[in-house]
């Protein structure tokens, strides 16, 4: 779906989507990628629409008597009839020519998807997509391609990894070209290794198209360098999904506090207060510059900069929610502020 956006006078258009279907997230993200402000009218929004609203990407409207004249464009969701089953299909034992392509889609904006990734999307028979993938790229998919959403919404809708693996295997065993489209890079906390192994164990060929990792892209989009001469000579990327005081954590947070490197934390929004406290107790200066950036590259991108000690409170005040990247280290404050033009 392509609209002539922005408007001729340069203003940001307001778009209202009516009758959203099970693939409404693709419609929304295609509009966002063209610079629109999007409202969705839906009496009973599903988990994906609620997720988009929670990330400030759309506004949900439930009132039936909206003033349509307030919008520049009003459209019915063109994908509303194109729902798909999430359950695995039955493989065809007679066909073995299928294969799987693991595509890293970057942090979300279509412009940060690689050309190789876009080519894979265009040639796919089946697209198995995460919620943080560049869903606007699905407009480039073949009209007959099957789209299967298998997102994991924090504390919400969740497709077990074992089911995702089985979907990839079953579709490929049926002779399909299956593209697994993920946000970021498949092998940076993307569980791409598990998907690779499941496919190889089933005798299927697998290829990888790397993606731009959010661990690097999101700080860059926010003007936060990970290294800077005379300040730091490296960076380390860790998962904050499991808090430092959790028995399941295998990250040596005490060692990280002493490395003198920039620390990049993915999936660490909920555990941020515990992470900051642990690093400080291990010897890191509480005044170390730190930043948290949510929805990097999207229209709802927002960030907060503070000291390590004050960051958790500041992030909560500024409604920094998942997905977010936290960066800790002197390089956070290395760049001069740009002057307003």
Image (cartoon, rainbow, N blue to C red):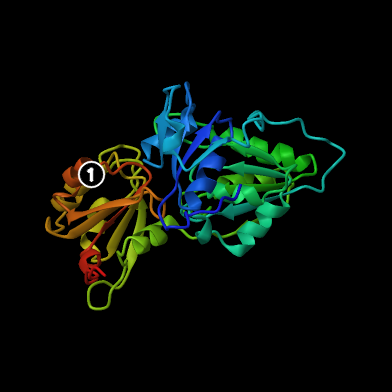
Is residue 241 toward the left or the right of residue 184 in the image? left
Q: Residue at x 47, y 48 (%)?
A: 32
The image shows residue 68 at horizontal and vertical percentages of 46, 33
User: Can you name the residue that lies furthest to the right here?
Assistant: 94
Name the image quarter holding the C terminus.
bottom left
Q: Quadrant of residue 259?
A: bottom left
Q: Please name the residue that numbered disc 1 is placed on.
A: 318
The image shows residue 254 at horizontal and vertical percentages of 22, 53
In the rendered view, tell whether residue 10 sits above or below residue 226.
Answer: above
Element under disc 1: loop
The image shows residue 77 at horizontal and vertical percentages of 58, 35
Is residue 22 toward the left or the right of residue 271 in the image? right
Is residue 309 at least partly visible in the picture? yes
Would you call the spot at circle 1 few (<14 residues within 10 Å), some (14-19), or many (20 or more)?
A: few
Is residue 138 toward the left or the right of residue 255 in the image? right
Comparing 68 with 341, the one in front is 68
Is residue 196 at least partly visible in the picture? no
Comparing 136 with 309, the one in front is 136
In the rendered view, tell whether residue 43 sits above or below residue 93.
Answer: above
Comparing 154 with 258, the one in front is 154
In the rendered view, tell whether residue 146 sits above or below residue 303.
Answer: above
Q: Residue at x 28, y 63 (%)?
A: 262
Q: Residue at x 37, y 35 (%)?
A: 54
Q: How many marks?
A: 1
The image shows residue 101 at horizontal and vertical percentages of 66, 52
Comparing 86 with 204, the one in front is 86
């Amino acid at each position: 779906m392509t609209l002539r956006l922005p408007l001729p006078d340069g203003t940001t258009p307001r778009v209202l989507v009516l009758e959203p279907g099970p693939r409404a997230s693709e419609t929304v993200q295609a509009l966002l990628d063209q610079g629109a402000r999007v409202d969705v009218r839906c009496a009973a929004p599903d988990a994906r629409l609620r997720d988009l609203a929670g990330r400030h990407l759309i506004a949900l409207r439930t009132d039936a008597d909206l003033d349509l004249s307030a919008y520049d464009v009003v459209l019915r969701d063109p994908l509303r009839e194109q729902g798909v089953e999430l359950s695995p299909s039955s493989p065809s034992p007679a066909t073995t020519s299928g294969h799987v392509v693991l595509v890293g889609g970057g942090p979300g904006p279509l412009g940060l998807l690689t050309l190789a990734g876009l080519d894979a999307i265009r040639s796919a028979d089946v697209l198995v997509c995460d919620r943080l993938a560049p869903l606007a790229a699905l407009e480039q998919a073949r009209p007959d391609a099957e789209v299967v959403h298998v997102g994991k919404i924090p504390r919400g809708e969740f497709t077990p990894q074992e089911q995702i693996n089985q979907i990839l295997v079953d579709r490929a065993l049926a002779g399909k070209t299956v593209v697994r489209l993920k946000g970021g890079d498949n092998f940076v906390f993307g569980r791409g290794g598990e998907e690779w192994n499941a496919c190889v164990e089933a005798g299927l060929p697998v290829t990888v198209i790397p993606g731009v990792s959010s661990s690097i892209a999101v700080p860059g989009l926010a003007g936060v360098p990970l290294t800077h001469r005379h300040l730091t000579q490296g960076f380390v990327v860790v998962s904050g999904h499991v808090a430092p005081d959790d028995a399941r954590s295998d990250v040596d947070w005490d060692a990280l506090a002493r490395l003198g490197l920039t620390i990049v934390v993915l999936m660490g929004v909920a555990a941020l207060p515990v992470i900051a406290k642990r690093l400080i107790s291990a010897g890191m200066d509480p005044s170390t510059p730190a930043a948290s950036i949510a929805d990097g590259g999207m229209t709802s991108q927002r960030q907060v900069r503070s000291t390590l000690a004050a960051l958790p409170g500041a992030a909560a005040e500024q409604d920094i929610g998942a997905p977010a990247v936290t960066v800790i280290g002197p390089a956070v404050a290395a760049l001069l502020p740009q002057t307003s033009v």
